[in-house]
Amino acid sequence: MDASLFTVQPAGPEPIYRQIVEQLRRLIAGGQLGAGDALPSVREVAGFHVINPMTVSRAYSLAEAEGLLERLRGKGMVVASTSRSSQSEASRLAMLEPSLQALVRQSRELELPAERVLRRLTTLLEDEP
Amino acid sequence: MDASLFTVQPAGPEPIYRQIVEQLRRLIAGGQLGAGDALPSVREVAGFHVINPMTVSRAYSLAEAEGLLERLRGKGMVVASTSRSSQSEASRLAMLEPSLQALVRQSRELELPAERVLRRLTTLLEDEP
Amino acid sequence: MDASLFTVQPAGPEPIYRQIVEQLRRLIAGGQLGAGDALPSVREVAGFHVINPMTVSRAYSLAEAEGLLERLRGKGMVVASTSRSSQSEASRLAMLEPSLQALVRQSRELELPAERVLRRLTTLLEDEP
Amino acid sequence: MDASLFTVQPAGPEPIYRQIVEQLRRLIAGGQLGAGDALPSVREVAGFHVINPMTVSRAYSLAEAEGLLERLRGKGMVVASTSRSSQSEASRLAMLEPSLQALVRQSRELELPAERVLRRLTTLLEDEP
DNA sequence: GTGGTCTAGACCACG
DNA sequence: GTGGTCTAGACCACA
């Protein structure tokens, strides 16, 4: 199991457990995690990122309540068979919409020309793809 | 004073006071608010957005502590004369960097092609500019 | 706020936080808690039942994720305006179905005549109604 | 040996091994299993219900520790000669009491009239008896 | 005052 | 080995 599956920023305003849940949503929607795939164990993730196991457990539990994950008793968590993996590009783009709109609002507050923002984003997106 | 200066989402995970402070930072950096400009009163903002006056007051106080605003006795808050208004495009773009990088990470988790993301962002940026 | 709103059995196999969530579901469905009603604070409930505040908090958070409760920042939890209070008798009866079926199965395993079980249940239901 | 003796719900919050032990208690109390009766082997039960043999084994061991079952060398488990089979209706009804009381509490939380609950239970009890 | 987050650690349940 | 539950306590965010 790859405990480096998640990116965690212990600093930053967003709570760790929610960072994990949201990454799970996207990784599943994007198809990088498919139904039945096993997840790294709570202890692995906690050890790797040096965070408390309960924090990881909380993320997994919420994801389970949301129908993203399933618990195989004694074996660990897997991506739920009912989770909608590999969704259409349109619906994945919809999941990005809030971030896109926030970016637009911020760009306008900063009076940044669209062209400048798009150019920078292009660079970042092409960086080590 | 225009109480609609700020956009506030009382729901949403980001605390209201921080939404206000960050908007202030960007509006000043972008030059939409210049040194000496008066801000809408705590009361006006709170009434307009139906939020607690204490929340607005807190945002203003933090912005003051940060050197963005100044308290003029009897006249309310104004943009500080020491605030760095109308910064260079480069430094404003730097303020957008965290949001850009988050967007890139999310796009990759969603396995969205760069072209798709850029196209959508272009549309949003050109929308009612 | 009435901290005695909930019945909690710290012993017993069912985790405390789930006991609370399930009672919330039923109290809301039954109309004893209506949209907008305030809930006892985490600390009150924890103090009253002598359990850890985090256990109560966990229950409230799950209920919020489920759409049963809403968080009024700084003020506490209230029954969500979107929660379906005072549901029809039919749908409330449906919520009881799993317990009813378990009871039937157990009665049969115990070879208890239906009449005996019904008589006992009648007594209990009429007891201090 | 009839591996379908037990009803097992691998999903559901109640641990499988406890489901089995409790069914054993009731089947013995109700007289459907009498002293000396042989039980299906661990293998049979595990295979039939597609659960881990260790889980069945654990249930049998607990039932043995409780005096419900006896291990006959080379022959498997049988109902213990010391087990109190075919208990009185009163004592069997007592074993149902916790479920009855839980049902009553839930009915009240749901504000369901006694008559409605009793009617539904009657139907279920008479169904394919 | 409210709830939220995280930690450290104990102990349990399950396979 | 897996995850779950609970505790005690610290500290933060918000109104």
Image: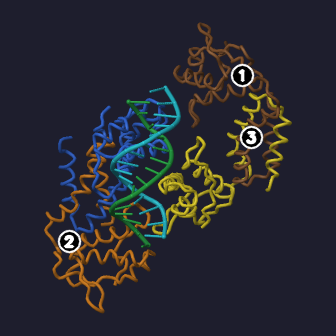
Chain colours: A yellow, B brown, C blue, D orange, E green, F cyan
Please give the name of the residue rendered at 40% of the width and 66% of the height, measured from the top-left corner: D9
Q: Chain of mark 1?
A: B
Amino acid on which disc 2 is placed: Ala
Quadrant in the picture for residue D57? bottom left
- Circle on res. B97: 3
Q: Quadrant of residue A109?
A: top right
Earlier sequence position, callout 3 versus callout 1: 1
For disc 2, the marked residue is D29
> Which quarter of the rendering shows the N terminus of chain D?
bottom left
CB of mark 3 within 8 Å of CB of mark 1?
no
Between the C-alphas of marks 2 and 1, the distance is: 83 Å
Vertical placement of A57 versus A124: above or below? below
* Residue D23 percent across, percent down from the top left: 29, 70
Q: Residue at x 56, y 60 (%)?
A: A45
The one of B48 and C85 positioned closer to us in this rendering: B48
Q: CA distance from mark 3 to mark 2?
A: 71 Å
Are tags 2 and 1 found on a single chain?
A: no
* Image depth: mark 3 or mark 2 in front: 3
Mark 1 Cα-neighbour bin, 10 Å: few <14, some 14–19, many ≥20: some
The percent coordinates of residue B43 (x first, y second) are 56, 14
- The residue under the point 50% across, 52% down is A55
Tag in front: 3 or 1: 1
Q: Is residue A71 left or right of residue B85?
A: left
Above or below, C105 against D66 in this view is: above
Q: Secondary structure at mark 2?
A: helix
**Most distant residue in the bottom direction:** D74
Give the residue pinned by disc 1.
B83
Nearer to the camera, A100 or D1? A100
Figure check: B107 above or below C85: below
Of tags 2 and 1, the one toward the viewer is: 1
